[in-house]
Amino acid sequence: MSADPNLRREIPDATVARLPEYLRTLSRLAEDGVLSVSSEELAAAVGVRSAQLRKDLSHLGSYGVRGVGYEVETLALEISRALGLTEDWPVAIVGMGNLGHALASYSGFVTKGFRIVGLFDDDPALAGQHVVGVPIRPLADLPACQVADPVSIGVIATPARAAQAVCDSLVAVGVTSILNFAPAVLTVPEGVDVRRVDLSTELQILAFHAQRKSLAAGDGDLRSVVSQ
Amino acid sequence: MSADPNLRREIPDATVARLPEYLRTLSRLAEDGVLSVSSEELAAAVGVRSAQLRKDLSHLGSYGVRGVGYEVETLALEISRALGLTEDWPVAIVGMGNLGHALASYSGFVTKGFRIVGLFDDDPALAGQHVVGVPIRPLADLPACQVADPVSIGVIATPARAAQAVCDSLVAVGVTSILNFAPAVLTVPEGVDVRRVDLSTELQILAFHAQRKSLAAGDGDLRSVVSQ
DNA sequence: CTCACTTTGTGCATGGGTTCACAAACGTCT
DNA sequence: AGACGTTTGTGAACCCATGCACAAAGTGAG
């Protein structure tokens, strides 16, 4: 029925995960005054194969010109639109320890569509303190804030033991997208998206590859140098 | 030749990425005094299918008992060994802004095999300050520290514009595993592993799914409520 | 206008990952 | 000892993602 061929139908997850990368590189090119890129150039700058880049971009329509390449400005706009960055996304951060502070003052937040509307922490020592012009409040104030400027994305930066309760509070006020930095698996009702970013997981994956390399080098004999 | 059938041959990347999750859950179970789990129970706790869990575990050997399940302690140890966490990994963090502080004081670092041996930042205001018993020094001191206690994993938590130079410094002193939190694509020589964690990428992926949901709900008409 | 050259968009083959389904292996109860 | 119920480990089928290779479509020169 509602075909609308050049609008999104279903963009594969793997492609969606790369779009932000493309967008960032295109923004940098635009700043440098570059007007047009080929798939070959852009792919090299991002670190993927050109065929993959072209296939990814083909999922959001046909915005290139054969024999020429892609217009930087246009392509950046189309990727922004596909990702939903032309809309406005009010974000709340819960847990204002070091990580919460880092996230709040992270430049990437403000640049594209994301707007911090609430900072929450139950530590009385933090209450009232402002971070980027936004006051830190106890989590109990969340429902009240929700009425004034509804949060659509919640970020959890608390210790693991508090994460599930915080998550429940967010879900209770209607948040359906959650970014979780706590090392805990959250259970949420149907329809709520949770993405988890875990610092120690990444470190462990790195350790695995490092170990592989050191095993490959010494190959079983020199292992004792390292293992002990 | 050197078959060694129950030792690792080649563990798929997708499996390696899930092992830390399994390990964390097993550790929690061990703390709670649980001695044995079935693949069904463990899979449910982690949030994957039981068949996937069994196939993942089969890559590191046969540590389950049919009709019974897995011994929690044993399995945790084997996963630790597979990931290389029974070895000692000296870590250096470069860039001690909010994120660097958060990473340094993150509990996940200390718990398993990772040991912070160096904190670096060129900001004179930070020099000499101690964070977790470790002093912050200028990056120029890196080569000297490297002699005393060689770093094997480097973490980059600087702004994007400094990331490549920092990366080059790390590579120059022999670091071959790098965890990069800066929103920049790093170019490194052959044999150096870089993993990138990008906060804004995760947010943008979340925004994409949130947009999909809101489009599905209002389906084109109520969109104006949100877009503006 | 035609020819030569460049670059996109995509059909197709290849490979890896996930899921299913079941035989093999273990404990237990009679 | 033998039968039964449970759970692992894995072969096989499916599914998605990646990479190749080429036709289609554009530009520019002669």
Image (tube, coloured by chain):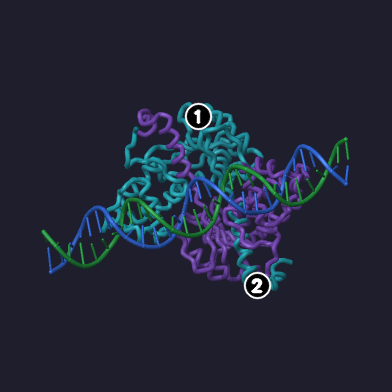
Chain colours: A cyan, B purple, C green, D blue
Q: In terms of secondary structure, where does tag 2 sit? A: helix
The Cα atoms of the two marked residues, 1 and 2, are separated by: 59 Å
Give A215 or B6, whichever is nearer the viewer: B6
User: What percent of the width, then of the height, locates residue A76?
Assistant: 34, 49
Q: Residues within 10 Å of mark 1 (few under 14, many from 20)?
A: some
Q: In terms of secondary structure, where does tag 1 sit? A: helix
Q: Are marks 1 and 2 on the same chain?
A: yes
Quarter-of-image position of residue D26: bottom left
Q: Quadrant of the C terminus of chain B?
A: top left
Vertical side of A123 occupied by A57: above or below: below
Find residue A218 and name its label. Answer: 2
Report the amino acid beneath label 2. Gly
Subunit bearing disc 1: A
Quarter-of-image position of residue A80: top left
For the point 44% across and 39% down, which residue is it? A115
Vertical side of A40 occupied by A91: above or below: above
Report the amino acid beneath label 1. Cys
Dots 1 and 2: beta carbons under 8 Å? Answer: no
Q: Residues within 10 Å of mark 2 (few under 14, many from 20)?
A: few
Residue B30 shows up from this direction: no
Q: Quadrant of the N terminus of chain B?
A: bottom right
Find residue A145 and name its label. Answer: 1
The answer to whether residue B152 is left or right of residue A23 is right
User: What percent of the width, then of the height, locates residue B82?
Assistant: 67, 58
Q: Nearer the viewer's eye, disc 1 or disc 2? A: 2
Residue B169 shows up from this direction: yes
Subunit bearing disc 2: A
Quarter-of-image position of residue A162: top right
